[in-house]
Image (cartoon, helix red, strand yellow):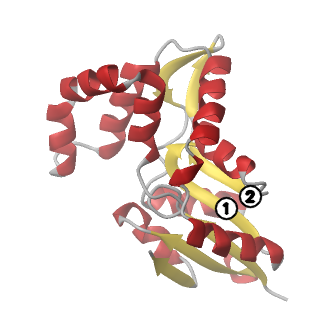
């Protein structure tokens, strides 16, 4: 019997907003958040115009705010953020995810967001899912500000799924996403749902 697998994007699909921006504001405060984004606004404009790579802009902004932070402190902030911002989760999509788990499907959350704050949201909800997110680089217990994996966006979402799933003809994949960063995953799925 063919295995049923579900893949969900996180930002804008399981949540109502982009969590990178919200996480930075939550952890750093509004003043520092605004100054940092003002500093990087030229890059962000170029990124929106597709003249500067998304992953490079994201990494520069992430490094600005979190380079040199202890991993233990960063993870504590991630857990606190997930606990205090549970309202950003989209109940209708969580119900679909829960139903998939109840039906015995394997469920993956495939996100460009950093898995350190994605996973605690799901743990808070008691959901046993695998998170495939962008991973951070740590040296000597400190965040370097760089990513240790490719930004889990676009075609990289498919590559991450291929790395953990069995042969393509042995499962039926249902995927949910909301943006151009999910297009490849939705196209690769047997059922792709744009939400």
**Looking at this view, is 11 or 150 the one in front?**
11
Circles 1 and 2, Cβ within 8 Å, touching? The answer is: yes
Left or right: residue 157 compared with residue 31: right
Question: In the displayed structure, would residue 174 be above or below residue 34?
Answer: below
The circle drawn on residue 129 is 2
Residue at screen point 50% across, 12% down: 68
Question: Which residue is denoted by mark 1 in the rendering?
Answer: 108
x then y, percent, for residue 3: 79, 80
Quick one: label 1, few (<14), some, or many (20+) residues within 10 Å? many
Q: Give the percent coordinates (x, y) of residue 184.
A: 44, 69
Q: Is residue 87 left or right of residue 146?
A: right
Q: Earlier in the sequence, mark 1 or mark 2?
A: 1
Q: Is residue 162 left or right of residue 184?
A: right
Question: In this orientation, which residue lies closer to the viewer: 160 or 118?
Answer: 118
Apparent side of residue 155 relative to residue 72 in the rendered image (left or right): left
Q: Residue at x 73, y 80 (%)?
A: 171
Of residues 118 and 169, the one drawn nearer to the viewer in this rendering: 118
Whether residue 4 is visible here, answered yes or no, is yes
Is residue 166 in view from this perspective?
no
Q: Residue furthest bottom?
A: 1
Image height of 186 relative to 80, above or below:
below
As measured in the structure, the alpha-carbon distance from the residue carrying label 1 to the one carrying label 2 is 6 Å
On the image, the x and y values in percent for residue 57 come to 30, 36
């Amino acid at each position: 019997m063919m295995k049923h697998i579900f893949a969900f994007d996180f930002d804008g699909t399981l949540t109502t907003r982009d969590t990178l921006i919200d996480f930075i504001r939550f952890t750093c405060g509004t003043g520092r958040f605004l100054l940092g984004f003002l500093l990087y606004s030229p890059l962000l404009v170029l990124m929106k115009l597709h003249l500067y790579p998304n992953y490079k802009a994201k990494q520069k902004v992430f490094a600005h705010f979190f380079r040199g932070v202890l991993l233990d402190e960063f993870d504590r902030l991630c857990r606190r953020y997930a606990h205090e911002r549970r309202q950003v989760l989209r109940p209708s999509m969580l119900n679909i995810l829960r139903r998939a788990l109840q039906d015995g499907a394997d469920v993956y959350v495939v996100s460009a967001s950093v898995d350190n704050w994605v996973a605690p949201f799901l743990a808070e909800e008691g959901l046993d899912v695998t998170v495939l997110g962008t991973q951070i680089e740590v040296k000597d217990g400190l965040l370097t500000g760089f990513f240790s994996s490719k930004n889990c966006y676009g075609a990289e979402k498919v590559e991450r799924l291929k790395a953990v799933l069995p042969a393509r003809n042995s499962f039926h994949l249902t995927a949910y996403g909301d943006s151009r960063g999910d297009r490849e995953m939705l196209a690769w799925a047997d059922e792709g749902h744009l939400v």
